[in-house]
Each structure stands twice: as C-alpha cells, then as structure tokens.
Image (cartoon, rainbow, N blue to C red):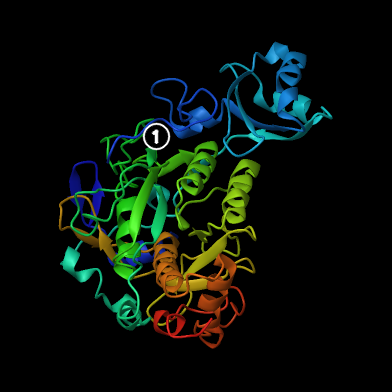
Amino acid sequence: MKWVGMKWVWVAFAAAMLCACGTATEAPSGGDGNATTNSDAGDTPLQAANKRVLVRPNSPDDMDDILEDVADFEGSVVKQIDGTNVFLVELPPDANIDEFIDELNGDARVIDSAKDRQVSSPEGGGATLPIGGDFDVFMIAPQAELVRIGANEARAKATGAGLRVAVIDSGVDPTHLALQGRIEPGGWDFVGNDGDPTDEANGQDDDGDGLVDEGWGHGTFVSSLILAMAPDASIRAYRVLDSDSNGIASQVAEAIIMATNDGVHVINLSLGMEDPVFVVREAIKYAKQNGVPVIASAGNTGQEDVTFPASISEAFAVASVDANDQKAQFSSFGDDIDLCAPGTRLIGAYPTAPDAAVMWPGTSFSAAVVTGLYCLVQELFPGESPPALQQMIEDASVDVDDLNPGYEGKIGEGRIDADAATSQEP
C-alpha cells in the first residue's frame, strides 16, 4: 500500500519494483546566523533554487566588489556557506539568472558560479513506493534480507555502540518504536528553519506531480535500517527534504558541514541530483578531510548513470541488488559504484503509527544498510581510518559479477557480507 495524503491506496509490489527507484537547538552559525530558507513563503525547493546562484570567488574579500560590478542584476548575498568560500546569492524573480552567471564566469575573480539545484531522494516522485502489508516494527531487525548478509552474526560481535550517524534526509519520527531512544537531540530542520527535524507531512502536492507527501517517512525508514544493523548507534537528523522528497543543494551542503562540525562519525546521504553542484562536493571534501565518510545512494535511474554525489570519488557509492544478488532493475550502475547491498525487499519503519512498517525498494535503503555495517566495523576497529574501514568492508564483500552478466564491475566490488566484515583482522 502507498500513503498518499491521508489515504492508503493499494500498489502492486511487482509494479512498484518495475518503476525505477526533537529537540530545539540554536540556529546554525554562518552568514546571518540562520539556516538558508526559501526566501518567499510558499516557495517550493525548485522555485527557491531558481532564484539563487552559488558563487566561489578567489577571495571572500572580493565578493562585494564582484556584485557591485554586476549591480544591474540586483543580486544580494544571502550568506556564506560555513566551511567553504562559497556564497549564496539571491536574484529578484525577474532577473535573468543565466546572464548573471555568464557575467560572473567571465570575471577573473570568480572560480565557480552556478545555479543552486533541486535535490530529491532516489525514490522521489514515486520512482519507487512504500508497499504496505502484514509488517510491523518487530520484523525489521530479523528480516530475511539482513539475515542473508550475516547481520545476526555481525550484531553478536558489535552493535555500533558510541557511533553517531548523521541522516541527511526528510527528518525522522522520534516516537517510532524502531527509533525511540536512539535519536540524538539537536540536528536541524533546513526546510522549516528550526531545531526540530521531525519527519512530517503537509497533506499537499507541493511539486505538482500528482502525488501527495510521497517522500514522507523516507528518513524514518532509512534510520530504522541503520539501527537494524547497528542497534546501539545513535541518529542525528538533518531535514533537507520536504514531504515530497525535494530539497535544495545549498542546504544539503550546509547539513553536511554542520553534521561534520557536530562530531558525527559517518553521514548517510540517500539523495541526489541530476547535475553536480560544486558546493556539495566541497562539503563532502570537508567531511572527508575531517574524518567523516559520506555513504551515498547510487540512484534509481536503472541506467549506467550514477547520481551525484554518489558519482564522485569522495563519496562511498552504493547500488542495489535483489534477493538473488542480481542488480535491482531500478538501480543505477557504473564504474563509480563501490559496493552493492540488498535493496528490493527491505522492511523498515514508517510514521503512520509507532509500530508501523512497510517494504520500500530503492538504493537509498541499500546505502542505509551499508552505513549500519560501517558503524559495526568502526566499533570493532576504532583505530582504523575511514578509508581503511571502507576497504575492509569491500574486501569482505561477496563477488556477484558472475550473477550479473553485462554489469561486471558496474555494481561495485561486491555485495556486502556483514559477518565477514566484522570477522576480519585490520
């Protein structure tokens, strides 16, 4: 079943499979002291992004002079993105944003300038849908897809104790039984610009795709899978996607940097965008330089087209396989993939009730399983660097190339094996 607005409607599992894929805190620092928000009340993420330009000057001191030289466009600095030399500039609705970018790119004082971009989860727009059935919260940890990768054996050796995971997504439902007691205070809601990153629906079709709140529950589902793998880890939520699974690239970058500064150990990024955005790459580099790996979903295009930012070398990219270890029909694939994990029959938490669970296919959820496994391995080998831990997980994976003719080397080093990854020596 699929939750649309305030109703449940039946969606056949086979059809969905064939579709390709709080506690208040102080405002985050940087710029005017607030998170970036949609400038006009009611702006969708796409409308907000279409008014904004990301600018990286050679020197931050040049920014005022740069804008003065293109004053006819009436651009104004919204803020400087923390941890970067990138500025977010907003234009009036009637300004020609492409001409503005052309002017900036012809300025020797400017390294990069580009539009802010809309982002979404791979499952956004109904690419894949949550499937209702006879599921409940107590089926999440012992589900077959986790058992077959050795999760039971791995959890007997480690539980993720002391590991803090940033889930940059649609928020979380802290009252759900699968998450109760594991959600850290703090985080941030970039959509609502407040300190309560709760996963919430608004009952509206904000993006006009004919679906209402189709992204609601995404972050809750992701978080429940991380905790199913690493039950003693904790989640710190950063809400950057609305209930239709849409957000803005600059806010994703802010969330990555904020999470890094908040001291998390790993970031789960189950979202993406069609085109690379340099500020997001800069944020991921910042995280990596500070010892925080970013585990990202490959995308649900079904094509040899890995979604940014999973497509960059700084991220750890995860594709999906089915119960037979064959590439999931919806999963993106390519040379940029690092690993694959189950992704077609995963059961996770859903916020319709404290004990509700659904089945939801997608690479977002494969990434969550890998993030949970990363926590177990880091707990066992705390002295190892993130790249070394990632390599250990890859080295322990099961080669599935023979099961995937035509996709050899395109869905990563192999399918994760949690038991083997937690049994090896560094």
Quadrant of the image containing the N terminus? bottom left
Quadrant of the image containing the C terminus? bottom right
Q: Position of residue 12 (x, y in %)?
A: 27, 63
Q: Is residue 100 left or right of residue 269?
A: right
Residue 368 or residue 160, whichever sits in front: 160
Total marks in image:
1
Residue 333 in view in this figure: no
- Does 387 sit above or below residue 404? above
Q: Is residue 328 left or right of residue 182?
A: right
| Residue at position x 61%, y 68% in the image | 334
Q: Position of residue 362 (x, y in %)?
A: 41, 62
Q: Position of residue 265 (x, y in %)?
A: 46, 58
- Does 266 sit above or below residue 213? below
- Does 13 sit above or below residue 4? below
Q: Which residue is mark 1?
A: 191
Q: Position of residue 347 (x, y in %)?
A: 27, 66
The residue lying furthest to the front in this view is 383
Element class at badge 1: loop
- Residue type beneath disc 1: Val
Q: Is residue 106 left or right of residue 349?
A: right
Label 1 Cα neighbours within 10 Å, binned few <14 / some 14-19 / many ≥20:
many
Residue 312 in view in this figure: yes
Q: Is residue 215 left or right of residue 62?
A: left
| Residue at position x 33%, y 43% in the image | 211
Quarter of the image holding residue 209? top left
| Residue at position x 62%, y 41% in the image | 279
- Does 52 sit above or below residue 167? above
